[in-house]
Amino acid sequence: MRPRGEDDGSFLSYCRALIARRASSPDLVEGGYESLPAPAGVWAFRRGEHTAVAANLSDEPAVIDCDGPRELDPWGAIIVDV
């Protein structure tokens, strides 16, 4: 049961989900870091053997090849199991 008044789309819920994802993923806990090619304004990297992360740090949509082409909204991010 979630605390009263907590919104599943809230920033707090998002942070809790990220923390849970990290705790349950050996790649995110122990995996090495490797930069991935990305368009300007996008930070993309691989952690461990099976996890890729891309964050669009710009005001424009971007497309990144992260286990296939993926469109990132402005200021959006993805975590992909590859």
Image (cartoon, rainbow, N blue to C red):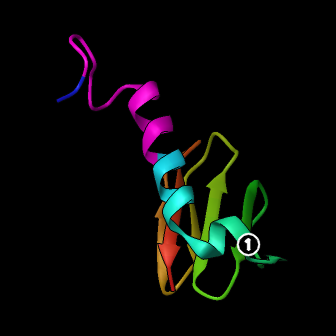
Instruction: Write down the quadrant of residue 57 in the picture.
Output: top right
| Amino acid under disc 1 | Glu
Camera-side residue: 43 or 3? Answer: 3
Q: Is residue 45 visible?
A: no
Q: Is residue 28 shown in magenta?
A: no
Position of 11 relative to 80 (above/below): above
Residue range in magenta is 3-17
Which residue in the protein does label 1 denote? 30
Name above or below for residue 11 compared with residue 48.
above
Residue 35 lies, in percent from the top left, at 82, 75
Residue 75 location in percent, x, y? 59, 42
Q: Quadrant of the N terminus?
A: top left
The quarter holding residue 46 reads bottom right
Compare residues 48 and 78 and report the one nearer the observer: 48
Q: Residue furthest top?
A: 5
Q: Residue at x 73, y 76 (%)?
A: 31
Q: Is residue 8 magenta?
A: yes
For the question of whether residue 5 can be seen, the reply is: yes
Left or right side of 78 for 40: right
Residue in the picture at 22% in, 26% down:
2
- In the shown orientation, is residue 8 left or right of residue 75? left
Report the residue at 27% width, 31% height from top: 8
Secondary element type, mark 1: helix
